[in-house]
Structure formats: C-alpha cells, structure tokens
Amino acid sequence: MIRTTAPRLRTLLLLLLAVTGALLAGASPASAHAALTGSDPAQGVVARTAPSQVSLTFSEKVAMSDDSVRVLDPRGKPVQTGSPANVRGTTYSVKLKSGLAKGTYTVTYQVVSADSHPVAGAYTFSVGAPSRTVVTGTAPAAGGGVVGGLYAFGRYVSYAGFIVLAGGAAFVLACWQRGAGVRAVQRLVVGGWIALTAATLWLLLLRGSYTTSGAFADVFDLDLLGQVLQTKTGAALVSRLLLLAAAALFVAVLFGTYTRREDATEKRDLTFGLAVGGVVVAAGLATSWAMAEHASTGLQPGLAMPVDVVHLLAVAAWLGGLTALLTALYRAPAEQPVEAAAVRRFSRLAFGSVLALVLTGVYQSWRQLGSWSAFTETRYGQLLLAKIALVAVLVGIAGLSRRWTGRLTDRSADAAGRARTDRVPAATTTRGGGAGGDAGDPGDARRAAQLARQRAAVDAARQKRLRDADENRFGLRRSVLAEAGVALVLLAVTTALTQTEPGRTEQEAEAAASASAGSGTSAASGALTLDMPFDTGGADGKGVVRVGLDPARVGGNEMHVYVQRPNGRAFDVPEVKVSFTLEAQKIGPLPVNPDHITTGHWSANGVQLPVAGNWKVAVTVRTSDIDQATVSKNAQIG
C-alpha cells in the first residue's frame, strides 16, 4: 500500500540512479565474508625441501580454534604441531613436524570470518615429488549439510519473527489503534515474538556445530556452547534474548493495559510511551544482526551498522505491517473492520519505508559489490538482482492496492452494526429456550449444544458475508494477499543473501588467485607455474586452472594440473585435457591426458617436449556434459 504519485516516483527513480552511479563510480577495496587470498606453500607447489610451517592469508581477520588448520600427509595422518597463530595482519600459520617425507600433502582450513560465517577449504602441495594420496582434498563440512540447512531455516524464521513482531506492533500503534483489541492481530504479534525467541535459542544451540564439525550430535555439546557464548555472534544472540524479554513486556502492555484505557489523555500518553519504547526495543533487536554480520566488518563499519539497522526496521515496518493488515482484512470480526483511514495511514508508512529501503539498499549494494560487473558475475550480485526484481513487483502490486484503498468505504461497518442488532433476538431466544427446558434431560442438553453449534456456524458465515460485502474491500484483500506471497519469497532471498559471500570479496579472491599469472612464473627450482582463469559459461563454470611443469626443460617433465574455484577451493571438474604447441616450428599440438589424483588435482609423468622454445600450453576444462572452455598461455621451455 504505497501512496504515491507520478512526480514522486520520478523523483525517487532519479535519486536512486544518481546515488547508485556516484557510489559505484567511487568504489574502493574492502572485504567481508573472509576468503583465502594466499598461502605458503602455495597451491600445487612442489617444494625441494620440506617446509617448517604452513601459512594462510585471508581477506580479513578470522577466528580460529586449535584444529582450524590441519596438514595431512599422503596417508591422511596429521603432521601439524600446536595451534594456529596470527603471525601478522590477516596471515595465520601452523608449525609442521620435522623430517616430512616426499609426497603430496593436503591443507584443510576451517575458520569463522569476522561477519560470523564459517569459511572452509582445502588445497595440496608436494615435497620432493607429487604422489597419490588417500585424502579427498575436499573442505570440511562446516556451514553445510543437515546442520547448515537447519541453521539457514532458523535464520529465516528469526527474520520472519522479527518482521511480524516489530511491523505488526507498528501497524497497531501508527495505523490502527483499535486493532490492539482484535484477537487475530494479537495472536499474530505474539506469534512473531514466539517465533523469534524460539529461532534465537535454536541458532544458539546450532552455532557451535555450524562453525566447526557440522555434526548434528554436537548441537547438544555444552562445552561447544560455552565457546560460542564467548564469540561475537554468541554475544549478539544472548543480547537478542535479553531484548526479547523487554519486547514481551511491551506486547503485554500493548494488548492489555492499552486496550483497557478509555481516557483520551491517558491513552495518548501511553501511545507515546509505547511508541518510544517500541522503537528502542526494535532498534536493539535489529542491532543484534548488524553487530555480528556483514555490516560489522569491511568498509565503513561505523556507518554500515546504523544503515543496516534502518534497513531492517524499514523492512519490518513495510512487510510486517502488510502482514498485520492482511490478518485484519481476513480475520477481524465484522463488527471491528479495519477502516479505510487505517489503510491510508499504512500507505504513507509503507511509502516512507520503501524510500528508506532504497537509500539504505543502494549503500549496501555498493559496499558489498563495488562494481557493476559483480551484479552478474557473482552469486551475491545475482541474488541481489532477484531481490531488486521482487521489490519492484511488490511496489507494482502495492500500486493496485492503493487504487482499491482509494475506493474503499466503510459500508461494512454499518452492516456490522445491523448484524449486531439482528443477533439480539436470537441470543434472547437461546437463553429463553434453555430456561424453559428440563436441564436435567440429557436429550435436551444434546439438542441445545447442537443448536448452539449451528447458530455459531451461521454467525461465522454471516460475518464472512459482511466482510466480503464491499467489493472494494474484497479487491484490497486479494491484492494484499498477493503482496504477502511475494514478500515470503523476498524474505527467502534476503536470508540467502546474508549467508552468501559478498561479490566484492569473491572478485578479490579471484584476482588474488590469478595474481601470479602473468605470462608464467618460474620458481627457484626451475619449475614453471601457469595460472589461467576460465569460464565455461555454465551455472558453475568459473575457476582457475594451474599447470605446473618440473623442470620445465627439453625432455621429460612432471606435469601437475590443479583446478580451483574463484574462492580458492578445489574444483572437481569431470575432465581436463592439456596440449603443447610450438607454433614457431609448427610442432604440435601434442596432447596430454593427465590422471585424476584427487579433488581438483591431475598429474602426468614423462611429458616430452622435444625442443626449446616459446610453447603454447592449452588446457581444456569441462564442467558439465555440455559446458567446456579452452584457455592457453605461452611459456618458455628450456
């Protein structure tokens, strides 16, 4: 129900375009949702001597436990000693046992980023010469699996509960104060409080397993729960529970004392007090999200957190108020219909909320994306586009609702008054019949109960007819129902956004992965490493392929091929092919079909390059039955 005019919409659109252009034009580096940007030893390196430690560098500071970084030998046995330590900035290292044997080693990491999300991954390096390994090379299960799904569901319910609680209460106080006495509206707001409280407790229990093992059995590990309470996210969830206790008192006053006040001055003072207290509690609840998620880290957190709070409050006022209005239109008694004036007041509230959403959303988009390309090239950007499209659909449906609001009358209120008059004789007859009958006769008692049920059914049908009597009110109910349906999908997309790596970070991780690409880098050992980004065009077709040749000279060579996703994780594609061409002497292409060693790792022995020269190394990567791409680089051999 957004009450607006054509000039208003044009002004809003121009403001949106101007601010978006200014922000995206001035984008500067930042991060949130940590990503691995470097490692030593690096992915795929064949070291001459065994390293004494493994170092990992992330895009932001992360939280680690004693077993956050593990280094496994070819047989799958851990070779790290002690706990990971922060050596400088965002670089963390773990010591290794001395005298490591030759072979391929797997590094797995599992950390928690500053915005509360678990980040896991794995890669391999070799000592002396590569070997087969029993380690799968896949990342730990944190953040995924059954626990990950349950945690995502809990987040969805918590957002929905907050929206219904805060938005429903705002609708009553700001738009329809008579609604405080409507049982259906009371149940809605109380239901929102119950959902938010239950979801918060659920998330608190799941948090430990979600960020560590991913095992459902660990949900009830009290030691793990104690560790969670010492984290930023644990503190945010506990703060939310304390604020929900204050929210319970607010709801009790709103639907208790407030409805019984009849003096106009006293009710006005209580309305002001409830409004101030409600805003404070709602803002505190919204802050419990802002202080532990994307807004709390990266670029301009001091500004991003209050902007995030305003964004959440605007969402609650719009969608929560919409839910309360829908409940009132469908469930309010015929003698207590929602008035046209209340709907118009909500139209103004919704317009202000959408304006706040646009302004805060533009800032958040710039902060999390940083460039226009991130809209289409990252999952976060694609989800954000879906969210923008859903908001546009909501605004369009709201325009239809406004048309019904303009024609809405209160004829149903008059009809309700007539209905109350009509029901008086029926009630009198019922009491008279009961008094004149033999109360001790079981048959009469059964007939009286049956008659009471029939009259209740007739009364319910009459109320429904009265609610549907005004065609404008009926049209408004249908358009608001459509809005609510779109809002449910919008909430699901928003929840997914909060759990997705921001586009800015994803692109930074991809750039870091290919930073050493150039035309080829040669290690001190004489080995050659080539990094080549690829995109097969499929839904999951982006990554980086790394080709390593040792000793990169004429004759036989050891070749290792590593395929990883833009975020640095191993990418187990179905097929990899390599060919070598020396165009200057018209030699080749010489095909090589490497053997699959482990996740994202292929190798081949005895790759023969007959003469020295500037060879073109071409790699074909297939990510599905129909999606593949060939990338190439030149490298000096011999």
Image: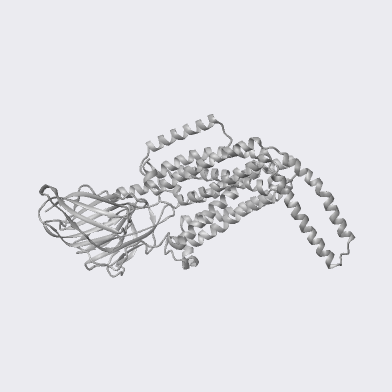
Query: Is 101 drawn above or below residue 410 in the view shown?
Result: below
Residue drawn at the location 45% of the way across and 47% of the way down: 295
Decide which of 456, 498 is in the foreground and name it.
Answer: 456
Q: Is residue 595 above or below residue 631?
A: below
Query: Could you say where residue 90 lies in the image, as x and y percent from the top left?
Result: 34, 52
Relative to 429, 337 lies left or right: left
One can see residue 229 in this view: no
Quadrant hosting residue 564? bottom left
Q: In terms of depth relative to the viewer, which is nearer, 337 or 510?
A: 337
Question: Is 208 on the left-hand or right-hand side of 574?
Answer: right
* x and y percentages locating residue 44 in the rendered image: 25, 58
The residue furthest top is: 7
Q: How many marks?
A: 0
- Residue 321 in percent (x, y) is at 60, 45
Q: Which quadrant holds the C terminus?
A: bottom left
The N terminus lies in which quarter of the figure?
Answer: top right
Colouring of the image: one colour
Residue 147 appears anywhere in the view: yes
Left or right: 456 in relation to 632: right
Residue extending furthest front? 626
Residue 408 screen position, x and y as percent: 67, 37
Front residue of 240/321: it is 321
In terms of depth relative to the viewer, which is nearer, 71 or 351? 351
Could you tell whether 618 is left or right of 13 in the image? left
